[in-house]
Image (tube, grey):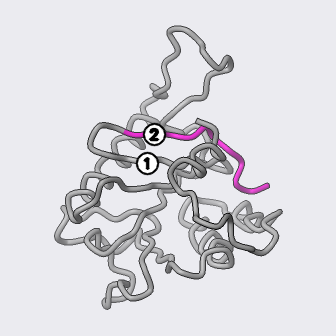
């Protein structure tokens, strides 16, 4: 699904899109990272400029002890729901999460070259992609299992490419990959 169609279908705002700062090049500082963990802080700084009603927290090293020690790279909370203990992951309070992979080859999905390609396999089958997809599923199961929700959202970032994912009880809707650095 194209990202714009995804946003319009699942995250439409009554009254249109609110004014926000120019986003062109806002995430370029993420490119200076030499490894995955170095992507988190510049991403949080850049994203915070556009989202004032949510708090982005680097939780990669602080797992949720109630959920098998799982810890997404960045957890996003409502301001009144940020866990008290430092940057601890808390799936029961989380609004959504962001999971990073340094290499674009870790992308758990593939986009078809033709819009209606027959026999196209959307899931990327490499070992690292399968592990990433499994990790996303584990975090989503912990998130959905901790709250009464109809659906939950994820942002998956692999290198300079990103995808929005909407998860519900029947499966997931995934956007085409897009360059979030532009």
Establish if 73 lies above or below 136: below
The residue located at (26%, 43%) in the rendering is 169
Q: Which residues are magenta?
A: 172-182
Residue 153: x, y in percent?
A: 43, 55
Establish if 27 lies above or below 78: above
Residue 97: x, y in percent?
A: 43, 63
Residue 166, which numbered label?
A: 1
Residue 172: x, y in percent?
A: 39, 40
Give SS at disc 2. Answer: strand
| Residue that mark 2 sits on | 173
Residue 112: x, y in percent?
A: 62, 22
Q: Quadrant of residue 86?
A: bottom left
Within-10-Å neighbours for mark 1: few <14, some 14–19, many 20+ = some
Q: Is residue 109 left or right of residue 112?
A: left
Q: Quadrant of residue 36?
A: bottom right
Q: Is residue 51 left or right of residue 128?
A: right
Q: Quadrant of the N terminus?
A: top right
The residue located at (63%, 40%) in the rendering is 177
The residue located at (32%, 91%) in the rendering is 84
Establish if 136 lies above or below 110: below
Q: Are marks 2 and 1 in contact (CB under 8 Å)?
A: yes
Q: Is residue 181 magenta?
A: yes
Residue 109, which numbered label?
A: none
Q: Is residue 62 magenta?
A: no
- Depth check: 103 or 74 in front? 74
Within-10-Å neighbours for mark 2: few <14, some 14–19, many 20+ = some
């Amino acid at each position: 699904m194209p990202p714009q169609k995804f946003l319009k279908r699942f995250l439409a705002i009554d009254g249109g899109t609110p004014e926000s700062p120019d986003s062109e090049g806002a995430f370029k500082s993420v490119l200076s990272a030499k490894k995955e963990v170095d992507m988190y802080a510049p991403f949080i700084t850049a994203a915070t400029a556009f989202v004032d009603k949510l708090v982005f927290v680097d939780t990669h090293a602080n797992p949720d002890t109630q959920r098998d020690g799982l810890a997404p790279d960045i957890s996003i909370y409502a301001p009144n729901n940020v866990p008290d203990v430092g940057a601890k992951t808390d799936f029961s309070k989380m609004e959504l999460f962001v999971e990073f992979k340094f290499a674009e080859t870790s992308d758990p999905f593939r986009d078809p070259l033709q819009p209606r390609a027959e026999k196209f396999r959307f899931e990327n089958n490499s070992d690292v992609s399968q592990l990433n997809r499994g990790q996303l599923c584990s975090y989503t199961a912990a998130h959905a299992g901790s709250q009464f929700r109809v659906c939950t959202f994820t942002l998956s970032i692999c290198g300079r490419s990103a995808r929005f994912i909407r998860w519900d009880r029947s499966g997931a809707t995934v956007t085409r990959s897009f360059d979030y650095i532009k």
